[in-house]
Image (cartoon, rainbow, N blue to C red):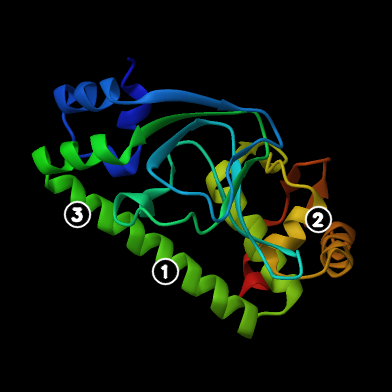
Amino acid sequence: MDTTVLKGVPLFKDLDAEDLESLGELMSDTSLKRGDALFREGDEGDRLYVLTEGKVKLSHSSDDGRENLIAVLGPGEIIGELSLFDLGARSSTVTAIAPTKMLSLSHKDMMVFLTAHPELSQSMLRELARRLRHTNEQMADLVFSDVPGRVAKALLDLANRFGERTPEGIYVPHDLTQEELAHLVGASRETVNKSLADFVSRNWIRLEGRAVLLIEVGRLQRRAH
């Protein structure tokens, strides 16, 4: 297989071409349409996934059915890494928010590969630590930041990962509905819409369907803090 995609994944950046080729031979392709679920919260997990195209959302449902959007992931990021250490039930639901392609690797094959490449375990732990830090930051934001600040921070984070610089600003095709964006920042849709409308009126952003153009990045950065 073409190992170019794997070489761009931070988790595998320290592997040489031969090792990447060996790893690629253990993987299989998976494709999803927008709205397709890769797996659901509570499902048994025994595979790791590497996104190569598109985007997915990770969500958790409360007892009363409300959705909490945990994260949006894109190309080069991994899903289901906890299954490498714990074959228990999935802790979140993963749903495509755009046409998505990914590579999958079974728990059994990954364990064999890790035994032969112990340095990869350190990369895996760094990735888990990064995810934990991000979760801690989200929790702190919910406690200490107001909704407009959280919206500004979410837009900047999405821009950092999916944005494309244009003469007018940073174009961010985030593929989220306003309801999903509200879930991402932990607020009601009405409150988030009010914050977005305020940013539009100040000419900081321009809304374009499931995308946004960030015009005044500096002002958004100050509002996020």
Residue where numbered disc 1 is placed: 133
Between the residue at mark 3 and the residue at mark 2, the CA separation in whole angstroms equals 37 Å
Q: Position of residue 142 (x, y in %)?
A: 64, 78
What residue is drawn where x is 89% and y is 61%?
Answer: 197
Q: Which residue is mark 3?
A: 122
Q: Is residue 223 above or below residue 197?
A: below
Instruction: State whether residue 63 is above or below residue 74.
Output: below
For disc 2, the marked residue is 179
Q: Amino acid at mark 2?
A: Glu
Query: Label 2 near label 1: C-beta < 8 Å?
Result: no
Amino acid identity at mark 1: Arg
Which tag, 3 or 2, sits closer to the chain's start?
Answer: 3
First reached walking from the N terminus: tag 1 or tag 2: 1
Is residue 202 shown left or right of residue 148?
A: right
Q: Earlier in the sequence, mark 3 or mark 1?
A: 3
Which of 216/106 is in front?
Answer: 106
